[in-house]
Image: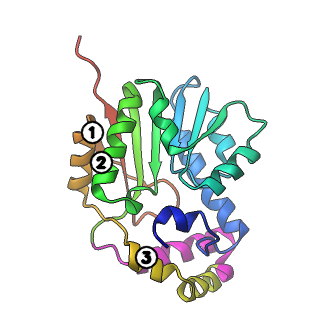
Amino acid sequence: MTSWIDYWNSDHPIYVNQRHLMLHYRGIARDIADLIAEPDAVVLDYGCGEALSADLVAARSRRLLLVDSAPTIRDKLAQRFADNRTIHVLAPEEVATLATGSLDLVIVHSVAQYLGKGDFMTLLTELAGKLKPGGSLIVGDVLPNGLSPIEDVKALLAFGWQGGFLIPALVGLVRTALSDYRKVRGELGLTHYDEAEMLAVLEKAGLTARRLEKNLGHNQARMAFGAVKFRDEA
């Protein structure tokens, strides 16, 4: 496995069953939808994954752009939302073709940990350039320094209890432990940030940033940040 893109483009054991997958994406979609203030908003979800409930976000938007690096995921998205004229599926390289200042809201959820810090800084700078003055960028699922994998286990089990898939969650943890995920994680690593560091990264990208009280989705051991693009001075 040469990159995390290769991993997500393959079959993997991260989701323990279909219910886990569905509830995971439904929760994130609801949290994103709650962030949309205007019905004519143009929203970009970078690193969206399978985005099973993207229609909930699209219903609150004028246009929803779903961006993912994995070709197999993009193919699934294009098929799933082929009849939804609000939703458009893009490859990462197509983001560069978007007009400067054309986006109202950008979501970058569960992406920071899979990129090196230099690459993530480059990505945020590009995305910030596509925001309208006063537009917002949300970075979610950021791994804090010192976060133990045990916290992810606890979050999954709590989610499984609440969502009615506790037994499959327990079985899934064993399956993941026996899969190549641990090897891939050891080879590729995950990137961690402390709060001050992520705030500084967002400020450097030209955004006014703060840590949010709640992460998107169910795992509250991870951090989320909200940032607003500077308005041009009159």
Structural distance between the alpha carbons of marks 1 and 3: 28 Å
Whole-percent x, y for residue 146 in the image = 28, 73
Residue at 50% from the left image edge and 44% from the top image edge: 92
Which label was assigned to residue 205? Answer: 1
The amino acid type, in three-letter code, at marker 3 is Arg
Say if 33 sits above or below 104 in the image: below
Structural distance between the alpha carbons of marks 3 and 2: 22 Å
- Which region shows up in magenta? 146-168
Return the residue found at the far front.
Answer: 2
In the image, 166 versus 68, the foreground residue is 68
Structural distance between the alpha carbons of marks 1 and 2: 7 Å
Residue at 47% from the left image edge and 82% from the top image edge: 182
Residue at 54% from the left image edge and 68% from the top image edge: 7
What residue sits right under mark 2 in the picture? Answer: 121
Q: Are marks 1 and 2 in contact (CB under 8 Å)?
A: yes
Q: Are marks 1 and 3 in contact (CB under 8 Å)?
A: no
The amino acid type, in three-letter code, at marker 1 is Ala
The amino acid type, in three-letter code, at marker 2 is Met
What residue sits right under mark 3 in the picture? Answer: 185
Q: Earlier in the sequence, mark 3 or mark 2?
A: 2
Identify the element where label 2 is drawn: helix
Rendering quarter of residue 157: bottom right
Q: Earlier in the sequence, mark 1 or mark 3?
A: 3
Say if 63 sits above or below 153 in the image: above
In the image, 76 versus 157, the foreground residue is 76
Whole-percent x, y for residue 201 in the image = 25, 47
Q: Please identify the quadrant where the C terminus is shown.
A: top left
Rendering quarter of residue 113: bottom left
